[in-house]
Image (cartoon, grey):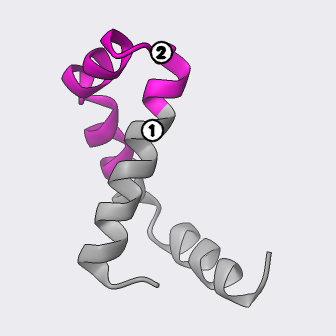
Amino acid sequence: MGQRYELLLEHAKANKKHYQNVIASIDGDTDSVDELIEAGYTENEARKIIYVLNGELISKLTNIN
């Protein structure tokens, strides 16, 4: 996937607890998942969308481009 991806992967490996906390926080957002399901998405799609949206937010907050 390229050097940038490898750097991000190494960062994730070195910061396991941080990413586990982020995942737990995202997993706890059942209200947003429910809203997306009501909008016609499957539960699987809704969960993936929440991860993408949160990933975009985290990327902007940490200035990872």
Q: Which residues are magenta?
A: 21-47
Q: Please identify the dominant SS of the magenta region.
A: helix
Q: Which residue is mark 1?
A: 49
Which corner quadrant of the image does residue 25 belong to?
A: top left
Amino acid marked by disc 1: Ile
Q: Residue most toward the front?
A: 39
**Residue at 38% over, 62% down:** 56
> Who is closer to the viewer here, 5 or 65?
65
Q: How many marks?
A: 2
The answer to whether residue 31 is above or below residue 10 is: above
**Residue at 65% over, 86% down:** 4
**Residue at 24% over, 75% down:** 61
Q: Which residue is mark 2?
A: 43
Does dot 1 land on a helix, a strand or a loop? Answer: helix
The answer to whether residue 14 is above or below residue 39 is: below
Does dot 2 land on a helix, a strand or a loop? Answer: helix
Residue 35 rendering spot, x and y as whole percentages: 25, 19
The first of marks 2 and 1 along the sequence is 2
Q: Residue most toward the right?
A: 1
Amino acid marked by disc 2: Glu
In magenta segment, residue 12: no
Residue 58 rendering spot, x and y as whole percentages: 31, 66
Residue 14 rendering spot, x and y as whole percentages: 52, 74
- Which numbered circle lies on residue 32? none
Cα–Cα span, label 2 and label 1:
10 Å
**Residue at 29% over, 63% down:** 57
The answer to whether residue 19 is above or below residue 40 is: below
> Who is closer to the viewer here, 55 or 11?
55
> Who is closer to the viewer here, 40 or 19?
40
Q: Is residue 42 left or right of residue 23?
A: right
